[in-house]
C-alpha cells in the first residue's frame, strides 16, 4: 500500500510539474509531429510578454512566401524587414526586438516552398490545431495572413474554410488555380488586400480583380495599393503592427443572415450553418441561403443535389416552429427541428436526407488523383513476375523518383522537406494498409498489393500496352486511397499545371482528374475524367477506354 501511495504521489507530482511548464514569451520555434511522414515539423511562434493561461487570446496564422521560411515570416508580420545589406539567410538566424502585441502568432514552415495545397495545406491546419492544444485561443478571433505565395495560400485556405477565420489579409497574393472560382465564399469574411502597383512578380491586377469583385458582391473588403512599390509590399502592409490593429476590428460570426458558398469537393463542404451533402464531382457547386425573416429562408442552388441546414443558434431561428424554405423558387415547409435535410429528386427539391451509400463519393472518398498525395501516403514498387536484377532496379528507381519531393530545385526554391516512405510490395505492413494512402506502381502481375485489390479495382492496363501507354487513377479502398500507375509513369512529357513549385513528377498532379489514360506522352491523352457518384465510368469515358484497346474495364 505504501509503495502504491508513493507511486501515485510521484505520478501526480510529475503531472503537476508538466502542466506547470510553459514556453518563454517572445519569438521562438517549436514543432508539431506530422503524421503525413512521421517527422517533427517546425513553425514560428510568438507569445505575448504577459501571457495569462486563464485568458483567451486572439491568434494570427502567418504564411511565408516562396523562397522564405517560418522564421522570416514571423519577423515580417511584425514589420521587421532585413537590416541594410542583410540577406534572407542572414536574417533567418535571429529574431530582432519588436513591439509586443496581445496576440499569439504562428507561422508554419509548410515544407518550404511548396504552395499551400496538399501536404503544405495540411501542415497549416496541423499548426492551427497544435496551437489550440497549447494555448487558450479565442476561436472567434482567429486570423489568417500571408505574403506572395503565402498571400495566395491565405486566399485558398480562407475561401475553402471561411468559417474558421474572423478576417484574412492577403499581401501581393499569388492564388493557386481554382481559387478565383470561390470568391463568393468571402461574403462573411472581411479581407484586406495589399499590393505594389509596380510588382513584377505578382501582377497588381490580381488584387484589383479580387477587390472589385468582392466590393460588388457586398463583402467587407479593404485595399491598400502602393505606387511605385515592387514585390515587397509587405514592408508597407505590416509596418508598425498595422495588421494586428486591423484584425482587432473583427470577430467571427458563425450565424450570419446570409451564407454564400461554392465548392468542387466534399473535402470543403461546410460553411457556417450550411453543409453540402451531395455535389457533382469536378464541377463548381454553389448555394446561397438567406434568412429573410424568423424561420424563413430563401435558397438558390447550382449543380448540388443535397444539403443540410443547422441554424440552431441563429437569432432568426426558433427550433420550436416549422421552417419555411424557398429553394430555387419552390416553397417547402419543414417541421420543427434543429437540423433540416433537403435532396434533389426527379427534378425537384424535397425535404429529406440523401441515403448514405458505402460505395458513393463522399468526404475522404472522392478523388481527384491529387487527394491520394495530400496526406499520409507511401510508394510501393512491385517485386513480382520474376524480374531480372536490372528490371527490379528500374522499378525501385521509378518509385524513388516519384517519392523524391526533397530534390534540390535551385538556390531560391530549395528543397521540399517531405519524406514519404518507399517500400517493396512484400514489405507493406498491415499498419500501412490501415493508415496510409498507397501509390502503387505496376500491375496485378508485378505488384502483389495491386493483386490483393484486383477484384475491387475498376480497370487494368493490358500487358500489350505496358510499353507505350500510361494508366493512372485513384480509387477508395478500406477508408483510404490507392493511386495506381501502370505502364508509363504519369509524369512522362506532361505540361506543368496544377501545384506550382513542386518537383517534376508533381508539376502536373493538380491538373489531373480521377483517371487518365495516355499513349507515349502525357500530352497525348486518350481518356480522362471523373468517376460518377458510384465510382463508375460514364458512357463517354467507357467508350474511349474500350476503343483504345489498351485497357480492360471490369
Image (cartoon, rainbow, N blue to C red):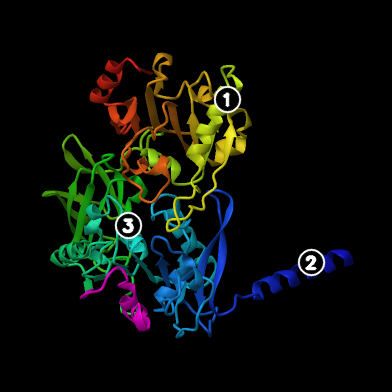
N-terminal-most mark, 3 or 2: 2
Residue 8 has which mark? 2
N-terminal-most mark, 3 or 1: 3
In the image: residue 205, left or right of residue 457: left
Whether 248 is drawn above or below 181: the answer is below
N-terminal-most mark, 1 or 2: 2
Task: Report the Cα–Cα distance between label 3 and label 1.
Answer: 41 Å
Q: Position of residue 168 (x, y in %)?
A: 32, 68
In the image: residue 427, left or right of residue 4: left
Is label 1 or label 2 in front? Answer: 1
The residue carrying pointer 2 sits among few (fewer than 14), some (14 to 19) or many (20 or more) residues within 10 Å by Cα, namely few
Task: Report the Cα–Cα distance between label 3 and label 2.
Answer: 50 Å
Q: Look at the numbered disc 1 and give the secondary structure of its residue.
A: helix
Q: Can residue 1 be seen in this view?
A: no
The residue carrying pointer 1 sits among few (fewer than 14), some (14 to 19) or many (20 or more) residues within 10 Å by Cα, namely some
Q: Magenta stretch containing residue 238, yes or no? A: yes
Q: Give the range drawn in magenta.
A: 224-246
Q: Name the residue under label 1.
A: 392
In this view, the residue in front, 522 or 162, is 522
Q: Mark 3 points at which residue?
A: 156
Q: Position of residue 85 (x, y in %)?
A: 43, 76
Task: Report the Cα–Cα distance between label 1 and label 2.
Answer: 56 Å
Amino acid at each position: 500500500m505504501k509503495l502504491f501511495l508513493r507511486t501515485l504521489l510521484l505520478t501526480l507530482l510529475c503531472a503537476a510539474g508538466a502542466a506547470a511548464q510553459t514556453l518563454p514569451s517572445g519569438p521562438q520555434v517549436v514543432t508539431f509531429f506530422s503524421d503525413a511522414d512521421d517527422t517533427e515539423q517546425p513553425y514560428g511562434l510568438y507569445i505575448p510578454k504577459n501571457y495569462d493561461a486563464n485568458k483567451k487570446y486572439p491568434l494570427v496564422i502567418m504564411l511565408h512566401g516562396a523562397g522564405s521560411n517560418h522564421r522570416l515570416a514571423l519577423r515580417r508580420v511584425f514589420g521587421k524587414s532585413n537590416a541594410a545589406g542583410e540577406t534572407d539567410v542572414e536574417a533567418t538566424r535571429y529574431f530582432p526586438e519588436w513591439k509586443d502585441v496581445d496576440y499569439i502568432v504562428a507561422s508554419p514552415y509548410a515544407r518550404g516552398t511548396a504552395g499551400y495545397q496538399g501536404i503544405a495545406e495540411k501542415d497549416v491546419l496541423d499548426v492551427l490545431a497544435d496551437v489550440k492544444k497549447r494555448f487558450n485561443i479565442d476561436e472567434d478571433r482567429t486570423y489568417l495572413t500571408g505574403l506572395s505565395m503565402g498571400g495566395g495560400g491565405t486566399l485558398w485556405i480562407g475561401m475553402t474554410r471561411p468559417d474558421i477565420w474572423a478576417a484574412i489579409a492577403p499581401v501581393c497574393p499569388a492564388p493557386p488555380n481554382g481559387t478565383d472560382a470561390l470568391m463568393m465564399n468571402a461574403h462573411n469574411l472581411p479581407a484586406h488586400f495589399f499590393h505594389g502597383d509596380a510588382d513584377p512578380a505578382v501582377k497588381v491586377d490580381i488584387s484589383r480583380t479580387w477587390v472589385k469583385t468582392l466590393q460588388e458582391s457586398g463583402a467587407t473588403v479593404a485595399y491598400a495599393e502602393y505606387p511605385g512599390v515592387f514585390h515587397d509590399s509587405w514592408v508597407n502592409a505590416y509596418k508598425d503592427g498595422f495588421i494586428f490593429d486591423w484584425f482587432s476590428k473583427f470577430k467571427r460570426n458563425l450565424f450570419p443572415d446570409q451564407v454564400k458558398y461554392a465548392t468542387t469537393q466534399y473535402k470543403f463542404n461546410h460553411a457556417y450553418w450550411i453543409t453540402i451533402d451531395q455535389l457533382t464531382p469536378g464541377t463548381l457547386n454553389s448555394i446561397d441561403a438567406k434568412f429573410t425573416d424568423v424561420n424563413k429562408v430563401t435558397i438558390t442552388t447550382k449543380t448540388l443535389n443535397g444539403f443540410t441546414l443547422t441554424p440552431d443558434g441563429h437569432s432568426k431561428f426558433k427550433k420550436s416552429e416549422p421552417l419555411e424554405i424557398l429553394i430555387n423558387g419552390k416553397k417547402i415547409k419543414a417541421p420543427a427541428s434543429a437540423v433540416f435535410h433537403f435532396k434533389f429528386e426527379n427534378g425537384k427539391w424535397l425535404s429529406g436526407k440523401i441515403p448514405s451509400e458505402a460505395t458513393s463519393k463522399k468526404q475522404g472518398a472522392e478523388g481527384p488523383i491529387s487527394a491520394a498525395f495530400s496526406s499520409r501516403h507511401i510508394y510501393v514498387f512491385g517485386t513480382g513476375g520474376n524480374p531480372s536484377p536490372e528490371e527490379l532496379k528500374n522499378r525501385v528507381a521509378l518509385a524513388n523518383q516519384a517519392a523524391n519531393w526533397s530534390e534540390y530545385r535551385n538556390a531560391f526554391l530549395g528543397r521540399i522537406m517531405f519524406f514519404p516512405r518507399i517500400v517493396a510490395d512484400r514489405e507493406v505492413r498491415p499498419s500501412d494498409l490501415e493508415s496510409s494512402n498507397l501509390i502503387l506502381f505496376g500491375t496485378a502481375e508485378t505488384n502483389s498489393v495491386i493483386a490483393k485489390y484486383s477484384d475491387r479495382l475498376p480497370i487494368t492496363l493490358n500487358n500489350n500496352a505496358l510499353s507505350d501507354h500510361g494508366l493512372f487513377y485513384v480509387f477508395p479502398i478500406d477508408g483510404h486511397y490507392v493511386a495506381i500507375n501502370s505502364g508509363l509513369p504519369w509524369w512522362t512529357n506532361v505540361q506543368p499545371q496544377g501545384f506550382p513549385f513542386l518537383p517534376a513528377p508533381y508539376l502536373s498532379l493538380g491538373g489531373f482528374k480521377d483517371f487518365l489514360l495516355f499513349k507515349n506522352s502525357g500530352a497525348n491523352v486518350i481518356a480522362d475524367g471523373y468517376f460518377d457518384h458510384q465510382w463508375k465510368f460514364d458512357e463517354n469515358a467507357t467508350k474511349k477506354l474500350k476503343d483504345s484497346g489498351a485497357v480492360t474495364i471490369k
